[in-house]
Amino acid sequence: SLNLVELNALYGRSAVSFGINDQFCATATPPLYSYPKMREFEATMAGACYLTQATAETADLFAVGTEIECYSNASELVAKAKELLVSPARRKTMRQAARARALHDHTWQHRFKALFHKLGL
């Protein structure tokens, strides 16, 4: 089992980190649905080149294609992973852009400021 420091270092060293956002819930309709998980922020803040499963909210969180990359099915996952693996310069640019965006817009401090503002505090 990795501790948080080791996990963050692994994200930073990996060529491409993958995200899977499917969730199964037998009582939901449909039973399989997708939503962004905390991994989107954890991976990008750690400096990952992040290739994640597209959700309805993904484009609200990161610029797809410049900060992160997304896939919708297995074939697209393979194709985009291959594209990223042969382009170290693009991976580096994406890592830097995603990390900057995550630290600017997606920290707990940012979330609580927005919440307190909405609550009038």
Image: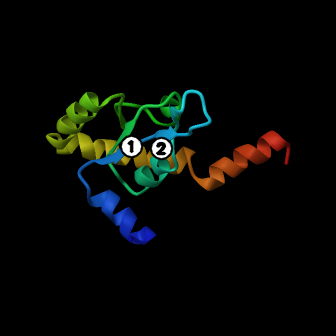
Residue depicted at x 37% and y 70%: 6
Q: Is residue 119 above or below residue 54?
A: below
Q: Is residue 117 above or below residue 43?
A: above
Residue depicted at x 41% and y 52%: 43
Q: Please, which residue is most extreme toward the front here? A: 26
What x and y, as percent, mark residue 27?
Answer: 62, 36
Residue depicted at x 27% and y 29%: 76
Q: Please, which residue is most extreme toward the right here? A: 120
Kindly indicate whether the residue at mark 1 contacts the one at mark 2 (C-beta within 8 angstroms). yes
What x and y, as percent, mark residue 117?
Answer: 78, 43
Q: Is residue 2 left or right of residue 111?
A: left
Residue depicted at x 21% and y 31%: 79
Circle 2 — which element?
helix
Q: Amino acid at mark 2?
A: Arg
Q: For mark 2, what is the residue?
A: 101
Circle 1 — which element?
helix
What x and y, as percent, mark residue 60?
Answer: 53, 31
What x and y, as percent, mark residue 35?
Answer: 52, 37
Q: How many discs mark residues in the rendered view?
A: 2
Q: For mark 1, what is the residue?
A: 97
